[in-house]
Image: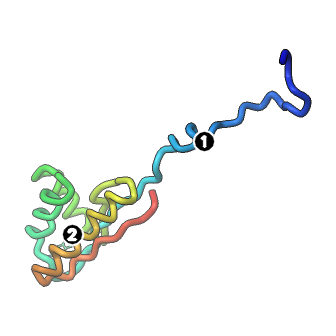
């Protein structure tokens, strides 16, 4: 067949394979301030769970301490949930009220 078929618009449509390559939505993992969790514990969490350096972890901890919350990292949904769950269970085990949530970017 040559030329366009009747009804063709010339507008490119995407195949299903291309649609599956859509970038995953990203989520911010937030650490919230409270009056009881020790600063050192928050720094340890940021190093162990979020792979931050000592100085980045300290800066993020102070940002949460001073502003009420801070972004610990930005991840795809499944990873972000895993970070929230690990942080929450470490805080629970240590009996600190540290709150960690996720939010669409
Ligand atoms: N505000 C806490 C204190 O003074 C420290 C802290 C920082 C707690 C950041 C939580 O996300 C947090 N001990």
Q: Is 84 placed above or below 10 here?
A: below
Q: Is residue 76 above or below residue 99?
A: above
- List the single residue furthest toward the right: 6
Judged from the image, the secondary structure of the residue bearing numbered disc 2 is helix
Determine the residue positioned at 28% across, 68% down: 84
Give the left or right position of residue 94, taking residue 62 as reference. Answer: left
View extreme (front): residue: 1
Residue 12 x %, y %: 72, 31
| Residue 16 image label | 1
- Colouring chosen for the image of the structure: rainbow
Name the image quarter holding residue 44: bottom left
- Regarding residue 94, the answer to whether it shows in the image is yes
Front-lying residue, 13 or 34? 13
Residue at 77% over, 31% down: 11
Position of residue 63 measured from the top left corner of the image (x, y, whole percent): 25, 62
Q: Which residue is mark 2?
A: 87
- Tell which tag, 2 or 1, sits nearer the viewer: 1
Give percent across and percent down for residue 83: 26, 63
Q: Is residue 64 left or right of residue 10?
A: left
Q: Residues within 10 Å of mark 2 (few under 14, many from 20)?
A: many
> Dot 1: within a 10 Å radius of its alpha carbon, few (fewer than 14), some, or many (20 or more) residues?
few
Q: Viewed as shown, does residue 67 lie left or right of 9?
A: left
The quarter in which the C terminus is drawn is bottom left
Ranked by sequence position, the earlier of labels 2 and 1 is 1
Q: CA distance from mark 2 to mark 1?
A: 37 Å
- The tag on residue 27 is none
Label 1 sits on a secondary structure element that is helix
- Residue 45 is drawn in which quadrant? bottom left
- Give residue 57's quadrant in the image: bottom left
53 up-or-down from 37: above or below: above
């Amino acid at each position: 067949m040559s030329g366009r078929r009747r009804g063709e618009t010339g507008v490119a449509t995407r195949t299903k394979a291309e649609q599956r390559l859509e970038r995953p939505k990203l989520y911010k993992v937030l650490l919230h301030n409270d009056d009881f969790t020790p600063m050192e514990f928050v720094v340890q969490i940021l190093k162990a769970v979020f792979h931050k350096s000592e100085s980045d972890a300290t800066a993020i901890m102070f940002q949460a301490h001073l502003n009420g919350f801070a972004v610990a990292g930005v991840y795809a949904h499944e990873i972000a949930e895993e970070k929230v769950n690990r942080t929450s269970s470490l805080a629970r085990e240590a009996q600190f009220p540290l709150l960690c949530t996720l939010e669409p970017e």
